[in-house]
Amino acid sequence: MPVFRLEEDEISFPDPRLADEDGLLAVGGDLSVERLVFAYANGIFPWYSQGEPILWWCPHERFIIRPEKIHVSHSLKKYMRKHEVQVLYNRDFADTMHRCRLKREFAEGTWIDDEMERAYGRLHGVDCAMSVEAYVDGELAGGLYGVVLGRCFFGESMFSDMPNGSKLALVKLAELLAQKGFSLIDCQFHTEHLESMGGETVSYAEYMELVNTGFSD
């Protein structure tokens, strides 16, 4: 399949089902609020390395967690009983996103560059992105951030400064989203870590059914 080139002055994408086998759909465009909202609503997200043009992806299979099916291991439950755990929402979105960047920047590299930080900061400014921060015994242990549209949460990245930090943030987020009737937490790609917490692979068609459910009244 050809990779489609986007124009900056037109907010549109080709049919997501035309993405390459690896999920690459299009290149170019911009990271405006309008384009990002349109992209996520159709299962498309940006992911590229610093210095590259913007690459837009829509894998044919998606890895998700249904909030009501979050799995909490016995060891994590034991850890939560032993420690005072507190979770805050939007404590400092910019700081949480930057911590996610730093955790990867000096390890395997990261897609979170200055442009991405500014773009998702703008999404947060219009209530389309949120951060979650977990504290253990009063110390910041970890967190995550993602895009929020309707009753859908599209996870972007997470960090841990203490054991179980990001797990605690994800568990508490899932519990909150389940209470609010959210249809999914989009994890984008499979990892064993997320699979152990209840993640599952779905087709793009089933994924969009869940997204559309999250957008319905």
Image (cartoon, rainbow, N blue to C red):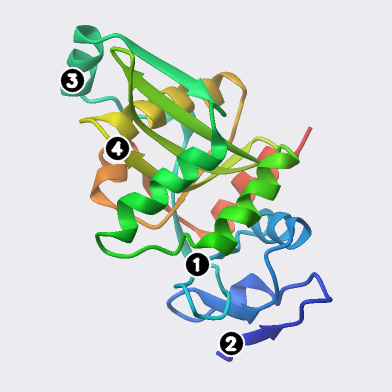
Q: Residue at x 48, y 73 (%)?
A: 23
Q: Residues within 10 Å of mark 2 (few under 14, many from 20)?
A: some
Amino acid type of disc 4? Ser
Cα distance, mark 3 to mark 4? 20 Å
For the N terminus, which image quadrant? bottom right
Q: Please tell me which residue lies in front, 130 or 38.
A: 130
Amino acid type of disc 2? Val
- Front tag of 1 and 4: 4
Which of the labelled discs sits on residue 74, or is there none?
Answer: 3
Q: Is residue 208 left or right of residue 37?
A: left
Q: Please tell me which residue lies in front, 94 or 80.
A: 94
Cα distance, mark 2 to mark 4? 35 Å
Amino acid type of disc 1? Trp
In the image, residue 127 lies at what x, y percent?
71, 37
Which of the labelled discs sits on residue 3, or is there none?
Answer: 2
Which of the labelled discs sits on residue 160, or is there none?
Answer: 4
Which of the labelled discs sits on residue 47, or is there none?
Answer: 1
> Could you say whether the residue bearing mark 4 is in a helix, strand or loop?
strand
Mark nearer the N terminus (2 vs 3):
2
